[in-house]
Image: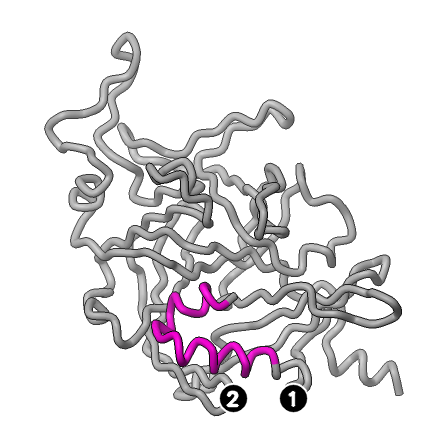
């Protein structure tokens, strides 16, 4: 969690302060909804953070709490931006240390001619996906079953730990090593690739030469931006929320206000990032107010 906060706070001192505020949320705040696993082994209260300027909901925090010795203990925290749900296929669960809730997901979609999508054939399901990425699943236990091999409606957002902005896709493809006048020729001249799709997605480990397994690599055109101020207790963080169009639809991510290229993130430009991608399952049960009324 500290590393993910640092992606948009960009200050170790403030990151620690905000983390303390987040951990205190459970005892100080009121959740907007609470998901509970069908077998009641997991309790997932979700809290909301609003833009201090417009008062609109911007970000949510979910506590993943497990039952141990008749007590609920915090097992994990999930921080994510609010977005519209999209239907995705859960391909497999990623067995990687430190990523207990990480899954590989896929989706079908159009890809520009002569570009390199992340086509991946799943033998166990007999499916081919145009776009693939790795995500941290939040509140997946609320579904009450193994989600691998199923289609689920999730809210996808990103917390990038490395990202750049480009004027066009030619610049993005140059970053990836493609040369506009020298396409990559496939076996027997069956195809030629001039670059990546403008909505390219892939697990980071398939793209990075250092085999970094953190999250996913995402590319997309910026569709809108919004200046916000998010209050974590007494600490207010100014940042910009940027939406960019990927193979999984529009995905929002935060840009720290003190980054040198903060003003470069403008509509029409392109983003390439390595990010902690989040797939939130949203409210699957009753709101907190409904649960309180029933308890009375």
Q: On the rendered structure, is 245 left or right of 102?
A: left
Q: Nearer the viewer, residue 10 or 170?
A: 10
Query: Which residue, given by chain and number where applicable, does mark 1 sit on?
Result: 28
Residue 171: horizontal and vertical position, in percent?
16, 46
Q: Is residue 202 visible?
A: no
Most frequent secondary structure within the magenta stretch: helix
Q: Which residue is at 83% across, 85% downward?
A: 293
Q: Is residue 181 above or below residue 133?
A: above
Q: Which residues are magenta?
A: 2-23
Task: State the residue at coordinates (29%, 43%).
Answer: 198
- Name the residue nearer the viewer: 242 or 276: 276
In the rendered image, residue 137 lying in the magenta stretch gets the answer no
Residue 6 in percent (x, y) is at 40, 69
Give above or below for 194 relative to 66.
above
Residues at marks 1 and 2 touching, judged by CB atoms closer than 8 Å: yes
Residue density around tag 2, few if under 14, some if 14–19, many if 20 or more, within 10 Å: some
Q: Position of residue 259 (x, y in %)?
A: 25, 71
Label at residue 111? none
Q: Residue furthest bottom?
A: 234
Q: How far is disc 1 from disc 2 in space, using C-alphas? A: 10 Å
Colouring scheme applied when the structure was drawn: one colour
The residue that disc 2 covers is 233
Quadrant of the rendered image containing residue 46: bottom right
Q: Is residue 139 above or below residue 56?
A: above
The image quadrant where one finds the C terminus is bottom right
Identify the residue at the far top of this view.
188
* SS of the residue under disc 2: loop
| Within-10-Å neighbours for mark 1: few <14, some 14–19, many 20+ | few
- Work out whether mark 1 precedes mark 2 in sequence or the reverse, and give the earlier one: 1
Q: Is residue 182 above or below residue 231?
A: above
- Residue shown at 50% from the left, 73% from the top: 59
Instruction: Look at the numbered disc 1 and give the secondary structure of its residue.
Output: helix
């Amino acid at each position: 969690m500290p590393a993910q906060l640092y992606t948009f706070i960009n200050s170790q001192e403030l990151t620690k302060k905000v983390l303390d505020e987040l951990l205190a949320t459970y005892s100080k705040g009121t959740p907007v909804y609470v998901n509970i696993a069908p077998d009641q082994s997991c309790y997932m209260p979700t809290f909301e953070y609003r833009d201090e300027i417009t008062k609109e909901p911007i970000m949510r925090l979910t506590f993943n709490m497990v039952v141990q010795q008749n007590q609920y203990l915090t097992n994990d925290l999930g921080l994510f931006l609010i977005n519209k749900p999209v239907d995705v296929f859960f391909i497999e669960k990623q067995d990687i240390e430190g990523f207990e809730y990480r899954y590989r997901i896929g989706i079908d979609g159009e890809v520009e001619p002569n570009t390199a999508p992340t086509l991946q054939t799943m033998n166990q399901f007999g499916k081919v996906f145009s776009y693939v990425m790795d995500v941290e699943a939040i509140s997946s236990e609320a579904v009450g079953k193994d989600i691998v091999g199923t289609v689920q409606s999730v809210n996808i957002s990103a917390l990038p730990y490395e990202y750049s902005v480009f004027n066009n896709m030619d610049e993005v493809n140059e970053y990836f090593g493609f040369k506009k006048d020298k396409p990559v020729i496939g076996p027997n001249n069956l195809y030629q690739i001039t670059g990546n799709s403008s909505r390219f997605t892939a697990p980071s480990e398939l793209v990075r030469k250092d085999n970094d397994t953190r999250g996913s690599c995402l590319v997309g055109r910026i569709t809108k931006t919004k200046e916000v101020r998010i209050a974590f207790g007494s600490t207010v963080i100014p940042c910009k929320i940027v939406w960019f169009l990927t193979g999984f639809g529009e995905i929002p991510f935060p840009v720290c206000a003190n980054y040198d290229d903060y003003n470069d993130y403008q509509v029409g430009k392109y983003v390439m990032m390595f990010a902690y991608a989040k797939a939130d399952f949203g409210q699957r049960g009753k709101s907190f107010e409904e649960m309180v009324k029933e308890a009375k």
